[in-house]
């Protein structure tokens, strides 16, 4: 609190980067794709990294409603739910052009909610590491898991198999509910921000906008995310594109919509 024109006004907790030195064994949460320099430091020091964007605790999402509106990106509600339950030593949260304004505001909430350093980063790394997992033949679920896990280390990904010929496309961010990925064939190529993630350049908007007009593609975004605009825009430009947004979980009707879209476009669901 401070005094302004004779009245007490509320001020928020301030933190400085210098307040935190990473120590071996520290439990450190990350949100988004922090810069390579941060990931390298965490990895060299032997910190234990927790990706807070992914569901990590079995707890009711409703618990986040004291901190965030119910109508808010489910990834960031998951971040808050994880932060409420994991005993972390610090959080690095990317809030620059490689993530979003919603994450910036959540960093303010986390600073007030937790008594640990919440360190904002802006990842504008330009060096591309490639995106071979996005193009390999593997279940889409497994590919997405490997790509999100890859954020925790400073190395390029190296799948066992070379790129396959795509039969379908998935454009977008890793969904809050990975179960919808099981509906796609193993020859689905990944585009959009997930490709930027694997490339370790999350702010590369040119790469994010790339799609393949020759394969039926689902343009996915989390409900209430600003990327819904880009997903809808690109889906309209694609000759066989479908815009899809999903909130916390994929309903059976959304699953049926994905299946119908792939079947109507003649995409075979071949085993891997
Ligand atoms: S899905 Fe959208 S709103 Fe949610 S964290 Fe990612 S960029 Fe931000």
Image: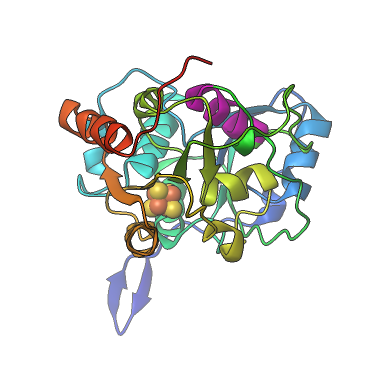
Residue sitting at 64 percent across and 31 percent down? 136
Q: Is residue 143 magenta?
A: yes
Q: Nearer the viewer, residue 95 or 14?
A: 95
Q: Is residue 259 above or below residue 198?
A: above
Residue 161: quarter of image: top right
Q: Is residue 243 above or below residue 56?
A: below
Is residue 126 shown left or right of residue 251?
right
- The percent position of residue 26, horizontal first and vertical second, equals 68, 27
Image quadrant where residue 121 sits: bottom right
Residue, x 37% and y 57% (percent of image)? Answer: 239
- Left or right, 263 with reference to 121: left
Is 17 magenta? The answer is: no
Its colouring scheme is: rainbow
Which residue ends up furthest to the front in the rendered image? 266
Q: Position of residue 226 (x, y in %)?
A: 36, 61
Q: Nearer the viewer, residue 107 or 52?
A: 52
Q: Is residue 197 above or below residue 9?
A: above
Q: Residue 21, position in %: x, y?
A: 75, 42
- Image quadrant holding the N terminus, namely bottom left
> Position of 41 compared to 100: left or right?
right
How many numbered dots are placed on residues in this image?
0
Question: Among all residues in the image, which is located at the extreme right?
Answer: 44
Q: Residue at x 83, y 33 (%)?
A: 44
Foreground: 115 or 226?
Answer: 226
Q: Which residues are magenta?
A: 139-150
| Residue 107 appearing in the image | yes
User: Residue extending furthest bottom?
Assistant: 5
Give the residue at x 65% y 37%. Answer: 151
Q: Main secondary structure of the magenta part?
A: helix
Asked if residue 106 can be seen in this view, the reply is no
> Along the line of sight, which residue is nearer the eye, 57 or 175?
175
């Amino acid at each position: 609190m401070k005094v302004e024109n004779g009245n007490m006004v509320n001020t928020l907790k301030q933190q400085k980067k210098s307040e935190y030195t990473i120590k071996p064994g520290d439990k450190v949460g990350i949100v988004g794709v922090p810069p390579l320099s941060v990931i390298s430091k965490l990895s060299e020091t032997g910190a234990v990294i927790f990706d807070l964007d992914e569901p990590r605790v079995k707890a009711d999402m409703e618990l986040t409603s004291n901190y965030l509106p119910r109508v808010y990106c489910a990834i960031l509600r998951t971040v808050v739910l994880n932060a409420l339950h994991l005993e972390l030593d610090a959080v690095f949260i990317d809030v620059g052009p490689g993530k979003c304004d919603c994450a910036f505001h959540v960093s303010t909430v986390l600073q007030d909610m937790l008594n640990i350093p919440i360190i904002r980063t802006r990842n504008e790394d330009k060096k591309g590491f490639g995106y071979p997992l996005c193009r390999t033949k593997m279940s889409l679920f497994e590919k997405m898991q490997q790509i999100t896990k890859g954020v925790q280390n400073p190395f390029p990904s190296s799948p066992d198999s070379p790129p396959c010929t795509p039969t379908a496309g998935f454009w977008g961010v890793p969904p809050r509910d990975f179960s919808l990925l099981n509906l796609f064939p193993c020859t689905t190529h990944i585009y959009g921000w997930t490709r930027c993630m694997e490339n370790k350049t999350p702010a590369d908007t040119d790469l994010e906008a790339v799609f393949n007009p020759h394969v039926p593609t689902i343009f996915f975004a989390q409900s209430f995310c600003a990327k819904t605009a880009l997903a809808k825009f690109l889906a309209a430009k694609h000759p066989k594109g479908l815009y899809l947004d999903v909130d916390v979980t994929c309903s059976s009707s959304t699953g049926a919509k994905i299946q119908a879209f792939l079947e109507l476009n003649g995409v075979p669901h071949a085993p891997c």
